[in-house]
C-alpha cells in the first residue's frame, strides 16, 4: 500500500461518519424557555411563640412532669409536680405572664419546683399568645421577588390614574370606620380572654382529678391580671386563695387590675417589689382601692429585690408566699 493511501484513509472514514452523527446530536431535547412553572408549595402556618416554648420544654424536662391538657380546640402543655407528702395541702396553679413559659426562671419555675417539698402540688400552665399583651404569633418575612430582565416601559396614562389622590373621607365615614375598628378589637380581646379562661378551667379540672383538697391560683406578671380577672368573671368556691406576684396589666386591659383584685371575695395576697417605681405606683392604687371598698380579704406584701443574687431573691419570694398561704 502506498504512503498516500495510508494517510488519507482515516480522513475519508471520518468524513463518512460525521454526517450520520449530526442528526443524532440535533435530536437531543432542549428545555423549553416557556415551560409552565412548578406549582408553588403551600407553607404551613407558623406556630405561636408559646407553642415553640412549650416544645422546647418538652425536650428538656422529664416526661412524667408533662401533661397535655385540652381547652376547647386547644391542646396545651402543663407541668405537674405532686406534693412530696402523703397528705397534700392542696394544689397551686401557676399562671405565667407575657412571654413567659411554664418553667420561667423568675417566680414560675422556682415556685413550681419548691412547693412540692413543702406539701403543695404545683401545676404550671402555658398561656396562648395574646394581642393585647404584645405577644403575637411569629410572622414570616417574605423576601422580595427578584426582578427578571428590564423593567417594562411605564404607561403615563396608567401612572396618572395610579397617582390620583383618593377622595377624602367624610367625617361620618371616618367615625364609622373608627367604630368598626373598635368593635373588632373588642371582639378579639373577648375571644382571647375566653381562650385563656378555658385553659384555667382545664387546669382546675385536672387539679380536681388529683383529689386536691384546696386550690390556689398564683399569677406572675400579666398572669396575675388574668388570674384576678378569671375569678372576677368566673367566681368559684373551688379556688380558696389568690396570689399575685409582681402583677402587671396587659397594655390596654379593661377592666384595670385595681378594679379587680381589691374587690374579689376570695382571699388575695398582692406581693409587690417596692423598689420598682411603676409597679409600686400601680400597687399603691390597688391598696387605696381596697381601703375605699373596705375589703378585708385583700393583703399587700412588700418584696425586696436582691441584685446579683437571683437565687436568694427567689427563695425570699417563696418563703413569703408560703408563709401567707399557711397563715390561719
Image (spheres, rainbow, N blue to C red):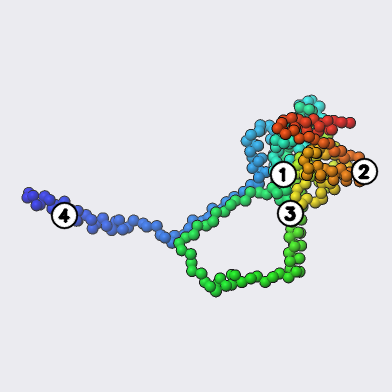
> Which residue is labeled 3 in the image?
188
Which badge, 2 or 3, comes first in the chain's sequence? 3
Mark number, residue 12: 4
Q: Circle 3 sits in a helix, a strand or a loop, which is it?
A: helix
- For the residues labelled 1 and 2, the Cα–Cα distance comes to 31 Å
Question: Mark 4 near mark 1, Cβ–Cβ under 8 Å?
Answer: no
Q: Circle 4 sits in a helix, a strand or a loop, which is it?
A: helix
Residue 1 spot, x, y in % from top left? 7, 49
The answer to whether residue 43 is above or below residue 242 is: below
* Quarter of the rendering occupied by the C terminus: top right
The residue carrying pointer 3 sits among few (fewer than 14), some (14 to 19) or many (20 or more) residues within 10 Å by Cα, namely some
Which badge, 4 or 2, comes first in the chain's sequence? 4
Which badge, 1 or 2, comes first in the chain's sequence? 1
Which badge, 1 or 3, comes first in the chain's sequence? 1
Q: Seen in the image, is 233 located left or right of residue 101?
A: right
The residue carrying pointer 1 sits among few (fewer than 14), some (14 to 19) or many (20 or more) residues within 10 Å by Cα, namely many
> Which residue is labeled 2 in the image?
294
The residue carrying pointer 2 sits among few (fewer than 14), some (14 to 19) or many (20 or more) residues within 10 Å by Cα, namely few
The answer to whether residue 177 is above or below residue 263 is: below
Amino acid at each position: 500500500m502506498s504512503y498516500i493511501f495510508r494517510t488519507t484513509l482515516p480522513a475519508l472514514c471520518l468524513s463518512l461518519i460525521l454526517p450520520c452523527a449530526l442528526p443524532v446530536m440535533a435530536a437531543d431535547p432542549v428545555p423549553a424557555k416557556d415551560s409552565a412553572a412548578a406549582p408553588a408549595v403551600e407553607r404551613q402556618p407558623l406556630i405561636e411563640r408559646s407553642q415553640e416554648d412549650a416544645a422546647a420544654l418538652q425536650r428538656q424536662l422529664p416526661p412524667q412532669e408533662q401533661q397535655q391538657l385540652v381547652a376547647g380546640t386547644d391542646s396545651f402543655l402543663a407541668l405537674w409536680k405532686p406534693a412530696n407528702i402523703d397528705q397534700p395541702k392542696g394544689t397551686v396553679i401557676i399562671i405565667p405572664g407575657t412571654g413567659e413559659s411554664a418553667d420561667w426562671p423568675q417566680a414560675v419555675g422556682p415556685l413550681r419546683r419548691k412547693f412540692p417539698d413543702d406539701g403543695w402540688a404545683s401545676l404550671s400552665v402555658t398561656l396562648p399568645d395574646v394581642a393585647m399583651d404584645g405577644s403575637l404569633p411569629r410572622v414570616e418575612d417574605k423576601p422580595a421577588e427578584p426582578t427578571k430582565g428590564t423593567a417594562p416601559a411605564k404607561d403615563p396614562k396608567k401612572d396618572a390614574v395610579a397617582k390620583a389622590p383618593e377622595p377624602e373621607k367624610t367625617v361620618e365615614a371616618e367615625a364609622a370606620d373608627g367604630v368598626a375598628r373598635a368593635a373588632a378589637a373588642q371582639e378579639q380581646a373577648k375571644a382571647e380572654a375566653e381562650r385563656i379562661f378555658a385553659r384555667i378551667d382545664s387546669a382546675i379540672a385536672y387539679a380536681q382529678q388529683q383529689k386536691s383538697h384546696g386550690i390556689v391560683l398564683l399569677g406572675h406578671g400579666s398572669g396575675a391580671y388574668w388570674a384576678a380577672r378569671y375569678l372576677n368573671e368566673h367566681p368559684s368556691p373551688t379556688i380558696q386563695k389568690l396570689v399575685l406576684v409582681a402583677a402587671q396589666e396587659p397594655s390596654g386591659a379593661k377592666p384595670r387590675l385595681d378594679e379587680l383584685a381589691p374587690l374579689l371575695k376570695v382571699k388575695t395576697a398582692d406581693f409587690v417589689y417596692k423598689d420598682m417605681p411603676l409597679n409600686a405606683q400601680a400597687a399603691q392604687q390597688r391598696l387605696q382601692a381596697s381601703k375605699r371598698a373596705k375589703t378585708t380579704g385583700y393583703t399587700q406584701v412588700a418584696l425586696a429585690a436582691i441584685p446579683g443574687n437571683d437565687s436568694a431573691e427567689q427563695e425570699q419570694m417563696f418563703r413569703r408566699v408560703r408563709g401567707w398561704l399557711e397563715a390561719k
